[in-house]
Image: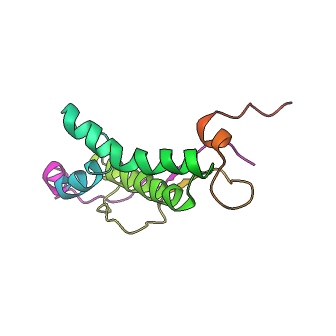
Amino acid sequence: MAREVVTNIEVTTGPRDRKTVFWRGILVAPVAIFISTFTNSWSDTSTYYYSTGIIVAPVALALIFRGRYPSYLLAFNKSIMELSLRFGAYLFLLTDDYPSIEANPKFTVELPEIPGGGGSTVTIAVTKPPPPSA
């Protein structure tokens, strides 16, 4: 069982769309705004703390009262990581595929398997597990 997050990117190396390279900064604005509502990307501290509270508060309450990391939030975090990956790949010219909110098999994020199939326990979610013995 792997204990790390694995990122897979299929980079386009063939003929590229040269027309959109100059305009990518403008074209990615809607996706950047969408991602920034769920991540800490603003420099303004009031927005930073407000957006963090939306995501962190439910997780903290679930860990405190149920003792488990909610599996639906784990799936949400994986989706946000994949969208951020597609956004970065498009912005930094690794692909010509526009970063939609739908899953793309060229860009995947694989999270470690959690024993029991559900959400992780408090110790798995809060502490880093020890490395496997050789």
75 w.r.t. 5: above or below: below
Q: Quadrant of residue 80?
A: bottom left
**Numbered range of the magenta stretch:** 1-27
Horizontally, residue 1 falls left or right of residue 45, namely right
53 w.r.t. 74: above or below: above
Magenta run includes residue 3? yes
Q: Residue at x 65, y 33 (%)?
A: 128
Q: Is any atom of residue 12 visible in this view?
A: no
Q: Main secondary structure of the magenta part?
A: loop
Across and down, in percent, residue 60 comes to 49, 44
Across and down, in percent, residue 48 comes to 26, 37
Q: Residue at x 57, y 59 (%)?
A: 71
Horizontally, residue 95 falls left or right of residue 33, namely right
76 w.r.t. 102: above or below: above
The color scheme shown is rainbow
Q: Residue at x 51, y 62 (%)?
A: 72
Q: Residue furthest bottom?
A: 102
Q: Quadrant of residue 130?
A: top right
The quarter of the rendered structure image containing the C terminus is top right
Of 108 and 125, the residue lying toward us: 125
Magenta run includes residue 14? yes
124 w.r.t. 103: above or below: above
Across and down, in percent, residue 3 comes to 68, 42
